[in-house]
Structures are given as C-alpha cells and as structure tokens.
Image: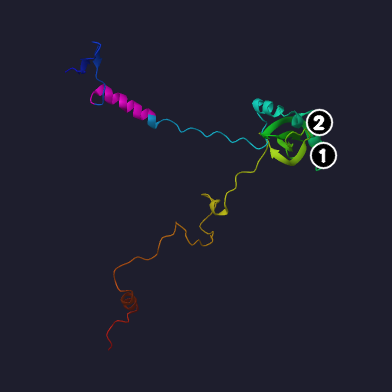
Amino acid sequence: MTDTIDSHTDASGEPTTETGSGSPVGAATEARTSTATLERPAPTPAPVPRAGALPTPSQQAQAAKDKPLTSPAAVELARHALEEITDPITVGEYLAAAPNAERLVTHLFDCTLSGYRGWRWAVTLSRVPRSRTATVCEMELLPGEEALLAPAWVPWADRLEPGDITRSDRLPRKETDERLEPGWEATGEDADAVALDQLDLGRPGS
C-alpha cells in the first residue's frame, strides 16, 4: 500500500503539492508549528538600572552639551557642596554626569565611606534659562551596580515558609484564613431535636 499526495497544476503550469491540514504532510507541519509555539520561552524582562548606575556614553554626551552645568567649575561646585554635608575624605573621584532634563544635570562621585562599597554620591545642578550660573538642587547617596542592597520587603504575613513552624507552634488567629474549613455541616435535621436526642431529653416520662 502506497501513500498518495494530492497535486494539481497552478496558473503557471507548474505542478503544486497539497500540504493543507487534510493531508499527512500538512498535519505534521501544523503539529511541529504548534509544538514550537508552546515551547517558546517567555521573554525575560530587562533589569531595572539602579539609581546610581553610571550613565551610558550617549547620555554623558547629551549632558556635556550643557556647558555651564558640566564645566570643571560646576564639578568643583558639586564637590564643595558634598564636603559641607560629609567628611571630604568620603568623597572619592569624579565619575560622570547624567542628564535629568533640560538644564538639569546630576554629577556622580565615588563614595569611600566604610561599608558603602559600590555606592555613589549624587549632586544635581540646575540653572535658569539664559543663565550660566549653576545652582545645587539636591544631594544624595545612591546605589551603583555593585552596591550591596537589602532584599525586597516581604510582609510579615507572607514570611512563613515550609519548615519554619512545627506542630507545637501557635499562630495568631486570622479571620479570613483560607486554610480553615468549617467544623460543621448542614444535615437537614432540626438543630434543637438533635440536641435533645443527644441529651436524652426526648424520652417519655415514667
């Protein structure tokens, strides 16, 4: 017994082969396509850059277009502002400038504080339109790419994991605990009659 494949001639006169879902060839092709679609992994979300991450070269070039806010004098202004709120020895080398908005630039300095490896001092400068005088807006300490951060906050109610508690541990009562089930069920009988029967109060008097 031999397999047959339907074929016909198209408008150009060339023979063509039927590979639709009605033929074995078409069914196999559709099956492979469906399997490939189901096995396709979900896209991995892009990591969110940290607040103190270094700007990209294109961002640094964009910030450099604002000369009054990125000049050596502006960098020194940012450093002096930091030295007013922290020990000058904790302000390390100058790293880069990042643009925030029009006439708004943030300068990043390395932080040399003990226990703050990978953190960076950030000083944001701005200027008014048609002015070449930089003004300090804010200063803060931000985590860089290698900074050690605390894990994400987990609510107390969700912190218990398998193995954290034993049979003898008592947990606080939760009004809407989905793990609890009612200890009673409807039987269709009169509740008072059931109680009297259990107490043997329904027997006739002697």
Return the x and y of residue 193 as percentages of the image width and height.
31, 77
Q: Quadrant of residue 146?
A: top right
Q: Amino acid at mark 2?
A: Ala
**Dot 2 crowding, Cα within 10 Å, few <14, some 14–19, many 20+:** few
Which sits in the foreground, 204 or 63? 63
Nearer the observer: mark 1 or 2; the answer is: 2
For residue 117, say whether it is visible. Answer: no
Q: Quadrant of the N terminus?
A: top left
Residue 34 among magenta residues: yes
Q: Which mark is residue 73?
A: 2
Give the residue pinned by disc 1: 83
Q: Quadrant of residue 57?
A: top right
Q: Amino acid at mark 1?
A: Glu
Q: Quadrant of residue 81?
A: top right
> What residue is drawn where x is 38% and y is 30%?
37
Region of the chain picked out in magenta, as a range: 22-36
> What residue is drawn where x is 71% and y is 31%?
97
Return the x and y of residue 47 as percentages of the image width and height.
57, 34
Q: Are marks 1 and 2 in contact (CB under 8 Å)?
A: no
Return the x and y of residue 189 as percentages of the image width and height.
29, 71
**Dot 1 crowding, Cα within 10 Å, few <14, some 14–19, many 20+:** few
Q: Quadrant of the C terminus?
A: bottom left
> What residue is drawn where x is 38% and y is 32%?
38
Return the x and y of residue 199 as percentages of the image width and height.
35, 79
In space, the residues marked 1 and 2 are separated at their CA atoms by 15 Å
Residue 206 among magenta residues: no
Indicate the secondary structure of the residue bearing disc 1.
helix
